[in-house]
Image (cartoon, grey):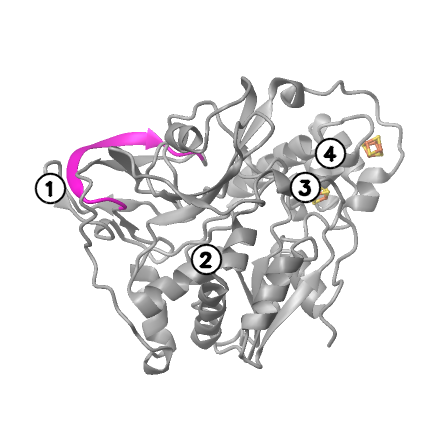
Amino acid sequence: MKLEALTFKGGVHFDGFKSLSNQKPWVVAKAPSVVTIAMHQHIGAPCEPVVAVGDEVKVGQKIGEAKAFVSTPVHSSVSGKVKKIEKITTPDGRSCQAVVIENNGLDELGYEELSRSLDSLTPEEIRAIVKESGITGQGGASFPTHVKLSVPAENPIDAVILNGAECEPYLTCDQLLMENQPERVLDGLAIIMKAVGAKEGYIAIEDNKQQAIRILREQNTNEHIHIASLKAKYPQGDEKRIIDAVLERHVPSGGLPMHVGVVVDNVATAASVADAVLRGKPLYERLVTVTGHAAAEPKNVLVKNGTPMSYIVEFAGGFKVQPGKIIMGGPMMGISQYTLDLPCVKGLSGILCMTEEEAKPPVVTTCMKCGKCVDVCPVHLLPLYIQQRALKGLYDDAQSLHALDCIECGSCSYVCPAKRPLVESIRLAKREIRAKEQRVR
Ligand code: SF4
Ligand code: SF4
């Protein structure tokens, strides 16, 4: 199979503003004097703190225990003393306990550095290490990785796709990771393939990252791993779209990748899997893209978990103009922030600093039935009609128009010449439909 110019139907092309931050090497942020480590950094149940105020902790030491299968532990990112345990809100809107640690600056390790061979490990052992190391998806959804790797026997997996599309504008942390540490990504893919019993693995990368594609192809020595080049188009990084593009398999409505024999993970997640399995390193730091036209010096920064976002922005060079809006992640699917006084979590891929001009709300006009929203919808929905029903409170009608299949990519709103807030209306409809389903149960 030729793995070039792969794509899906629908989607949008836009200026990715990637060059703001991808032209320079990443920098390692000095750890702050205090980190605030959230106990809920993933989809699923929160962790419970296993340290108390006054305890001494070390880098990589477990400080939050997962008490459910869909949950994953949390580790300290610094060495020092637990100052307090308090309730906080995370940048992704979770309200949870957090362990606040005063950094003693000694960077004492709380885990054993290993040099482990993959050959010696069974799939069960890999999953156990991945869980204990606190690995979650780092592409946005923060799904506990060991859960994805625990595939039921009735869904045999024959392919793993690593998502290196990074299709959101502005973000470049995955690109820099693939260009600079390809061996971590390749090792991680081989480990995930073994964990799920997949024969073939793919790293799927948009063709606006030619250097990453070239480097990974040069470095790859595994004949069962393939580097796929995707057309740069949003939302190419959505897992159903990437499966469609790479393998031409269609995940049914309401289905999961495993239903078509596939597991999809992000490239940064795979690199963390390699760190954990081969070197014994838990997940306590990550690359974050600090970017946008209000940022003075956009760049990628390697950051300790629990570092305040305000510290990260300051470390990267601060603002050049007053920001009008700050977003965790990219502009299409990211989450607007009301303050920068919140700590870095495992799912923080970027801090996007938009100018006041860029953040101005658009003037909304009447739908002119141009059909552009329909043309771009990657799920083949009718966004204008779903919005129409949602605005009238006709949620049953919205459901029959398959509102629940909407992946909230925002492509329809982006292209709409009338600037209609389509995705917001569809999100509301989804919430109401789900609430009704809950009431009926
Ligand atoms: S793109 Fe906007 S104006 Fe055009 S049909 Fe859709 S909602 Fe209406
Ligand atoms: S309807 Fe949903 S899936 Fe379709 S373009 Fe809009 S936000 Fe994306």
Mark 2 and mark 3 lie on one chain; the one further toward the N terminus is 3
Looking at the image, residue 414 sits to the left or right of residue 371; the answer is: left
Residue 253: image location, x then y, percent: 67, 57
Q: Is residue 77 above or below residue 387?
A: below
As measured in the structure, the alpha-carbon distance from the residue carrying label 1 to the one carrying label 2 is 30 Å
Q: Secondary structure at mark 2?
A: helix
Please tell me how crowded label 3 is: few (under 14), some (14-19), or many (20+) other residues with Cα within 10 Å.
Answer: some
Magenta residue span: 77-91
Residue 88 on the magenta span: yes
The disc label shown at residue 269, or none: 2
Q: Are marks 4 and 1 in contact (CB under 8 Å)?
A: no
Mark 1 and mark 2 lie on one chain; the one further toward the N terminus is 1
Residue 360: image location, x then y, percent: 66, 18
Residue in the image at 58% along x and 45% along y:
22
Q: Secondary structure at mark 1?
A: loop
The disc label shown at residue 413, or none: 4
Please tell me how crowded label 1 is: few (under 14), some (14-19), or many (20+) other residues with Cα within 10 Å.
Answer: few
Q: Which residue is mark 3?
A: 16
As measured in the structure, the alpha-carbon distance from the residue carrying label 4 to the one carrying label 1 is 50 Å
| 4 vs 3, front mark | 3
As measured in the structure, the alpha-carbon distance from the residue carrying label 2 to the one carrying label 4 is 30 Å
Q: Which residue is mark 1?
A: 55
Mark 1 and mark 3 lie on one chain; the one further toward the N terminus is 3
Majority SS type along the magenta span: strand
